Amino acid sequence: MRRLANLLFFATIFTFASVAQASGNSGFRFTTFASGEQEVPPPGVLTDTTARLRLNFARDLSEAEFRLSVFDGEGITQAHLHCARAGENGPVVVFLFNVAPVPGPGGVDVNGRIAHGVITNDDILATDPDASPVCGVTINNIASLFAAVRKGVIYLNIHSEANPPGEVRGQVFAFRGASDD
């Protein structure tokens, strides 16, 4: 019986570690690789643009640091975290990048890091599952954003002048050891 309990204990720890890997003082690390094929509705957007997001939550869930890179991006206007499962569109919960609101064309061409920074509770655009059932969870602070990422309902969306609803998209998942940019 004790052997079974130990086995279950280590299996639980291994499962948790694979869902959100802790690394030194950086806390819990997540990533996504975004492409036009993941845009909704299918079949997505035909584009050469791709993106990568690294999202590191502090251990105490007081903030989250992000690094966002866009490759072969033309006329990029905005980047957000949204709340919905793969295959569904949902509300914006965090702005990551926004070209200054000016009349007319205003996107930027980019091939590399476009934005980085720290997300705090003040940066969260609150969601309510009654008002946005596609999201299905309340997001109103960093801890609830972390819970939503772990649940698989947060995705990155990069917007462009050519595709205002979205150029590339990718669900955010547990970090799997890719090198930092």
Image (tube, rainbow, N blue to C red):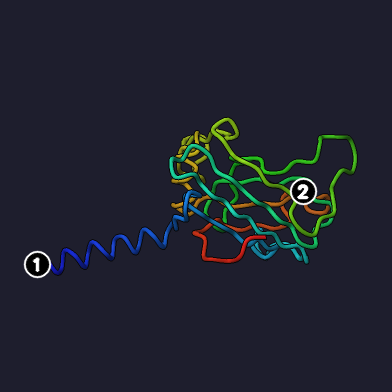
Tag on residue 1?
1
- Per the image, label 2 sits on a secondary structure element best described as loop
The residue where tag 2 is placed is 164
The three-letter code of the residue at mark 2 reads: Pro
Whole-percent x and y of residue 100? 81, 36
Question: What residue do we see at 59% from left, 59% from top?
Answer: 32
Classify 10 Å Cα crowding around label 1: few (below 14), some (14-19), many (20 and above): few
Marks 1 and 2, how far apart in space? 59 Å
Q: How many marks?
A: 2
Left or right of 127: which side holds 19? left
Whole-percent x and y of residue 29? 51, 54
Question: What residue do we see at 46% from left, 37% from top?
Answer: 138
- Per the image, label 1 sits on a secondary structure element best described as loop
Question: What residue do we see at 53% from left, 66% from top?
Answer: 177
- Work out whether residue 40 can be spotted: no
Q: Which of 119/163 is in front? A: 119
Question: What residue do we see at 55% from left, 43% from top?
Answer: 64
